[in-house]
Image (spheres, rainbow, N blue to C red):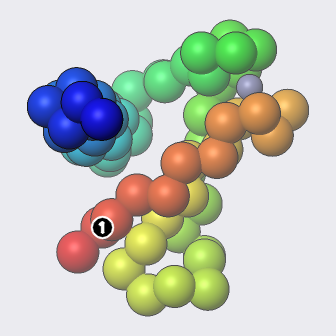
Amino acid sequence: MDFSALTKRSSASFNQHKNLLKKLAKGQAVKCEVCQGILTLDLKTQQPAKGVAKCPNGCTEIVLDLA
Ligand SMILES: [Zn+2]
C-alpha cells in the first residue's frame, strides 16, 4: 500500500473543493468535468452547513463543507 499517494490525492481533492466553493461563492461559473454543464450550488441539503454543487445532468454532485 502506498499511503503517500493516497494522502496526496485526498489533499488535492480537498483543495479542489475549496477552490470550487470559492468560485461559486463569487458567482463564477464552474463547469462539470464530464458534461461541461454549469454547476449550481444547492444549499438546501439535509445536512446543516453543507452545500451540494451539481451539474444539470447529475454526473457531478460534490458535497461542500460551508462551515
Ligand atoms: Zn455533468
Q: Is residue 59 visible?
A: yes
Residue 21: image location, x then y, percent: 32, 44
Q: Residues within 10 Å of mark 1 (few under 14, many from 20)?
A: few
Q: Quadrant of ligand 1?
A: top right
Residue 16 vertical position relative to residue 62 in the rendered view, above or below: above
Residue at position x 49%, y 24% in the image: 30
Residue 38: image location, x then y, percent: 64, 25
Q: Amino acid at mark 1?
A: Leu
Does the beta carbon at disc 1 come under 8 Å from ligand 1?
A: no
Q: Quadrant of residue 23?
A: top left
Residue farthest toward the front in the current orientation of the protein: 1
55 sits left or right of 32 in the view: right
Residue 32 vertical position relative to residue 59 in the rendered view, above or below: above
Indicate the secondary structure of the residue bearing disc 1: loop
Q: Quadrant of residue 52?
A: bottom right
Q: Is residue 12 visible?
A: no
Residue 16 or residue 1, whichever sits in front: 1
Q: Quadrant of the N terminus?
A: top left
49 sits left or right of 52 in the view: left
Residue at position x 54%, y 48% in the image: 62
31 sits left or right of 16 in the view: right
Residue at position x 43%, y 72% in the image: 50
Q: Quadrant of residue 2?
A: top left
Residue 18: image location, x then y, percent: 24, 42
Count the numbered circles shown. Answer: 1
25 sits left or right of 63 in the view: left
Residue at position x 51%, y 85% in the image: 47
Q: Quadrant of the C terminus?
A: bottom left
Residue 46 vertical position relative to residue 58 in the rendered view, above or below: below
Q: Which residue is mark 1?
A: 66
Residue 44 or residue 32, whichever sits in front: 32
